[in-house]
Amino acid sequence: MRIFVITICSLALATGGYSAQQEENKQQKKKHPQTVQHAPAATTAHPTGHPTGAGANPKHTSMEAYHRQQGAYHGQKGIKGPPSTEAYHEQKGKRVQTSNAAYQPQTAKKNQTQAGRQTAKAANERQTAKTSPPRVPGVKPGNGSQVKGASKPNQAKTATTAGQSAAKGKFAQGKPVKPQHFNLSKQPNTAKAPPVKFQQGRHIQGSQNWHGQQYTVFRNYSSQWHNQNWWHNHYRNNIVFVFGAPYYWNAGYWFPAWGYYPNAYYAWDGPVYGYNHLPPDQVIANVQATLQQQGYYQGEVDGLIGPLTRGAVADYQRDHGLYITSAIDQPTLQSLGMT
């Protein structure tokens, strides 16, 4: 009877100790869910989760040994436990490095593309500067001045605009040209410079568009017919004779004195700018010689402002941004360097 009671008490104590151990294990799992370590190779674990081996006692197994056993058990079963903090950061670092490695080639490629565009733009601007026509003095660059190979009508239109902009009196000054005295024929070559006919009250065509004080003489000019007495009374000694025709001096220009000799010869009806006390024929001859040196005039230096001379003057004025007056005016002589 006594042995039976002792046996029952032993079983009760064993059962109570086992239950207490199970409850303690559950509480430890709740407190340390991710602290899992690999157990040493010498320790084995029972499939049910109870540690076995020499000296293994469920009642006295420490928490550290239990976790090692749990790690060994998961390792044998191929169960992947929760990753440690060090492993997590290591994996995160790898992902960040991979992302940066993928981003850097894209950034480099984008920078290369932008650099290529800037290089191409600079090359295009240099090519445009080489192929663009030279800027005409007094003309603002626009569509007309940027067209390559522009036709002659467009060039003439641009030159007209340039002449209108030249009214401020700013002209390109050429190298100084010393006046010369030419031995001219006493008889005009009417084949190259035919005479013009008198027209009472005639004004110079287009002069109303020539602005500026230097063109006032052309805007105010009007053909007048008077006899010798009238011319002598008004201009007295300011009259010279060229090819037998009288010219009078006024406001820095020589003008034809229509009516002084009814049959006088004039190659052009308009003002001729006078400088250095030269008569009209010598002024014209100096202009012809200067334009001849620059390749504008191909005719003879004869002192006659005929069609060939007026055409050469007009070409020079067009190329140098002056009003195309086709006449010998002060801005043209100033541009040629003659004044």
Image: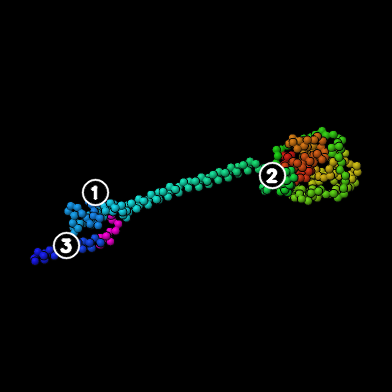
Residue at far top of view: 183
Counting from the top left corner in percent of width and height, residue 283 is at 79, 39
Q: Which residues are magenta?
A: 27-38
The residue under label 1 is: 41
Q: CA–CA distance between discs 2 and 3?
A: 117 Å
Quarter-of-image position of residue 261 = top right
Write the residue at 73% across / 47% down.
Answer: 157
For the residue carrying disc 1, how many other residues have a C-alpha within 10 Å: few (<14), some (14-19), or many (20+)? few
Q: Which label is found at residue 136?
A: 2
Amino acid carrying mark 3 in the image = Ala
Amino acid carrying mark 2 in the image = Val
In this view of the protein, can residue 84 be seen by the observer?
no
Most foreground residue, 169 or 205: 205
Left-right relation of 82 to 326: left
Q: CA–CA distance between discs 3 and 1?
A: 30 Å
Counting from the top left corner in percent of width and height, residue 172 is at 70, 42
In this view of the protein, can residue 96 be seen by the observer?
yes
Q: Which label is found at residue 274?
A: none
Most foreground residue, 82 or 205: 82
Q: Quadrant of the N terminus?
A: bottom left
Q: Nearer the viewer, mark 2 or mark 1?
A: 1
Q: Does the stretch in magenta take in 245?
A: no
Q: Quadrant of the C terminus?
A: top right
Q: Which label is found at residue 14?
A: 3
Write the residue at 30% across / 57% down.
Answer: 34
